[in-house]
Amino acid sequence: MLTPGSAGVMNQAMSGLVLIYSRALRKGDVIRVADNEGLVSEIGMLATKIITRENYVVTVPNAVVVSGKITNLSVQSADGGINLTVGVTIGYDTPWRQVHAMLELAAKRAKGIDLTIAPLVRQLSLMDWYIAYELQVRLQPGQSLAAARNALFSNIQDVFNEFNVQIMSPNFVMQPERTVMVAKENWYMPPAAPPEGSK
């Protein structure tokens, strides 16, 4: 009766040693493990405790942490700031330059963003009916990931409304009567601006 229980405890303890000595994560790191995302508050011999955005304390057995995928969102930053990435999908009838400019503007207006590092906008995928965009920003040290994500989403909605661009993923049940595209004269719709020296 003792052997199965002892084996389980030893497995957890060995996993705890692996976490501690491999420095895969440290107290104060913001991590994503399985379905849990939050701040590491404690790394024990048997389990790791994570404080989630809801301010819940989730205790994850070390064997689960070691055997799964750990995404450490803060380890690359020496100053404690972490990267935040959000996505949005917009139809082809909106100029991509305008979408880039609006996402960058939303990032500049959001609280808790480190503006010494320029926001980065990527086009991840050209889907059948829309484009998938990604906005990445660096948070100021000590900022809550959940609060910053909420502020960024709010500002994205406000900026898109300000410039009359609908946030949506369009779909068609039949071929549109006209081509869904952006005319060249509309490539640089506000807040986008053409490069200096271009005609």
Image (cartoon, helix red, strand yellow):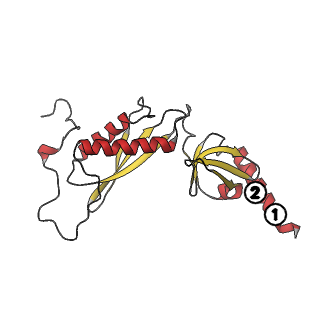
Kind of residue at disc 1: Ala
Q: Nearer the viewer, residue 125 or 150?
A: 150
Q: Which image quadrant for residue 76? A: top right
Compared with residue 122, is residue 65 higher up or lower down, i.e. above or below?
A: below
Q: Is tag 2's residue or tag 1's residue first in the polypeptide sequence?
A: 1
Q: Position of residue 130 (x, y in %)?
A: 27, 57
Q: How many marks?
A: 2
Compared with residue 73, is residue 12 higher up or lower down, i.e. above or below?
A: below
Q: Which residue is mark 1?
A: 7
Secondary structure under tag 2 reads helix
Image quadrant occupied by the C terminus: top left
Q: Which residue is mark 2?
A: 12
Which residue is at a point 42% across and 41% down the rendered structure image? 151
Q: Is residue 49 left or right of residue 199?
A: right
Compared with residue 171, is residue 153 higher up or lower down, i.e. above or below?
A: above
Secondary structure under tag 1 reads helix
Which residue is at a point 29% across and 52% down the rendered structure image? 167
